[in-house]
Amino acid sequence: MLELYTSEPNTFFLKPLIALHEKQAAFTTHWFDPDELEPSGLDFSAEVEAHLHLEREGPLLRHDGTLISNSFFMLEYIAEALPGEKLLPDAPYDLYRAHASGQFLGAQLGSLVPVLGCVRYLAPRLNAMDRSALDARLARVTPQERRLAWQALVDGTYTPQILATARERLKLPVSRVESQLAQAAWLAGPDYSIADIDAFAMLRAVPDLAPEIVNATATPRILDFLARIEARPAVHAALATSRSGKPHQHFVPGVEPSRWG
Amino acid sequence: MTVHLYHWEPNANSGKPMLALAEKGVEFESHYVDLLKFDQHQPEYLQVNPDGTIPTMVHGDRVLIESTPMMEYVDDAFEGPPLRPTDPRERWRMRWWMRFFDSYFAPSLSMIGWSVFVGPAVRQRPREELEAAIARIPLESRRIAWRKAMFNEFSEAELAESRRRVTFCTGILEDHLARHEWIAGTRYSLGDMNGFNLGYALPLSQPDHCNDTRTPHIMEWLRRIYERPAARKIWSLGRTAMAQRVKFLERAAHA
C-alpha cells in the first residue's frame, strides 16, 4: 500500500507527485496544510528519519508501513522500488550525475528558493494570524531548528540585505543548470530522469520569485527545460492536485542554509 | 582505465571514496592534496576541479567532485562486493543517514575541528599570505569557511550550537545503532563508510559524550569497521596525527 502525505504541489511536495504519476502508480493521498504547523498529523516519535529529516515539513511516503522522507531520496526510492517508467539513467556516470545533482541542488535550491518564497507568500499569511495564537503554535514545534525557521518569518530576520544575498547566491545553481542544459537536453544522461524532476520542482518557482535571474534572456535553456517538463501529462496530473489553484504561492521553510555563513 | 583520486587525509570527505574503493577492491592512483598548504586552490588542481574542493575522482574522461555520490559511483562502475543494500527501503535509509551525516552532523563537527585544528595549523602565517590564499578560492562558501578558520571568526554562539548538535547527533546515532546492526539495517554499506569517516575520532574529540559507557553501540560499530582490512589499509595512508587517532579503536589498546 502506497500513501503520500502531501500538500500544495510546489517545490518539495511536487517531486513525488510527478514521479508517482510518471510511474502510473496507484497511491492514496493524505492532505495537510503546513501553515497549520502540525504537518501530516502523524506521530513521528518512533520514526527518527521522519522527525529529523532536513526538509522539515515536506512530503512523506508510506510504503507498506515504512515512512520514506526527503523528497530527492523519495524520488530515488520511487524510481528503484516501483514498476513502470524507469526514471533513472543506465550508465554509472549518468547515475552519478543524478545523485550529484540531487545533492548540490538539494542544498542550494532547497534552502534558497524556500526563503524567497516564504518571505513573499507565507510570511504575510502568518502575519495576518492572531499573534498570540501563532506563538502558541510555534512553541509546540519541534525540533528547534524547524521552530526557529518559522519564527524567522515573523520576527524580522529576513532583512533586505539577507534577501539580496539569497538572490545573489541563487545565481550559482541557476548558472550551473543553464550550463548543463547547453550540453544536453536533460541533466543526467540522454533521457528524462529524477534529476530533471528534482530540478524542475524547485526551479519552477524561480521565474516568479527572481525574474532578474531566470528569464528568457539570461536563462533561455532553463525556460525551455521548464516548458518541456510542464507539458508532460504526469506533471499536469501532479499540478491538478492543487486545492488553492495557486500552488506557486505555497512554500515551507525547507532546508536550513549553511551555518558557516 | 586507471582511477585517479585526489584526496587529503583519510578523514571526512576525502576518506569516503578512499574507503569505498578499498572495500570494492579497486586500486587507485593516489594524488595527495595537502589541505593545510592550500594545494587545492593552486592552478594545477583547479585544472582538475575548478571548484577547488577535495576529493576529486578522475576515471577516464569522467570527473567526479561530490564525495557521497562518488561512493555510489564506485559501487555502480566496478566489479566487486556490493556496497549498498538491494532492498529499496534499506537503500533509502542508507541515503537518509548519509545526508544526515553530510548536512547536519558533519558541518557542526567540522566547525569545532576547524576551530581547534585547521585554523591554528595555518594561522601563524603572515596575514597577507592568508588573504592571498583566500582570494584564490573559487567558491564563496569556501572563502567564508576558510576566513572564519584562519582568523578565528567563529562566534561563541556558533560553536555552542555546534557542540549542542554534535551531542544531540551522537545520541541519535547511538539509538539508531542500538536498533540496527549497521546504518542501513542488516548489512555493512556506504552509509557505514560515510559515518566512519565522520565519527572515527569521536571517542577522542568528544570523550564525555562518546565512550564505552554512554555509547556502547557506536564504539562497537566503529571498532567493527576499523577491523576491516579496507579500513586498515586506507588509514595507514594517513600522514598526520589527525588520521593516527584511529588507533584508539584498537581493541588491544584497551584490553
Image (cartoon, coloured by chain):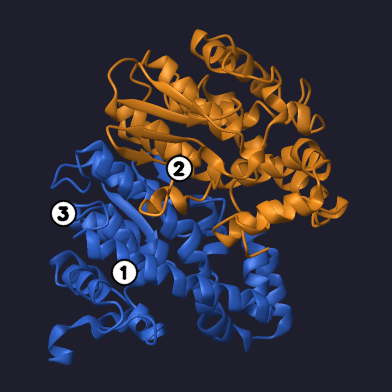
Tag 2 and tag 1, C-beta contact below 8 Å:
no
Looking at the image, residue A174 lies above or below residue B95: above
Q: Quadrant of residue B228?
A: bottom left
Foreground pick, B36 / B88: B88
Element assignment for label 2: loop
Between the residue at mark 1 and the residue at mark 3, the CA separation in whole angstroms equals: 30 Å
The orange-tinted chain is: A
Q: Do pointers 1 and 3 mark residues of a single chain?
A: yes
Type of the residue with mark 1: Glu
Q: Quadrant of residue A67?
A: top left
Residue B8 can be seen, yes or no: no
Residue A253 lies, in percent from the top left, at 65, 45
Instruction: Tell which subunit mark 2 falls on.
Output: A
| Lateral position of residue A189 relative to residue B29, left or right | right
Instruction: Quickly name the residue at label 1.
Output: B174
Looking at the image, residue B144 lies above or below residue A211: below
- Total tally of numbered discs in the picture: 3
Looking at the image, residue B224 lies above or below residue A53: below
Instruction: Quickly name the residue at label 3.
Output: B25
Element assignment for label 3: loop
Nearer the observer, disc 3 or disc 2? 2
Looking at the image, residue B33 lies above or below residue B215: above
Foreground pick, B124 / A198: A198
The blue-tinted chain is: B
Instruction: Quickly name the residue at label 2.
Output: A42
Between the residue at mark 2 and the residue at mark 1, the CA separation in whole angstroms equals: 24 Å
> Quadrant location of the N terminus of chain A?
top left
Q: At 52% from the left edge and 63% from the top edge, which residue is drawn?
A: B40
Q: At 35% from the left edge and 56% from the top edge, which residue is drawn?
A: B5
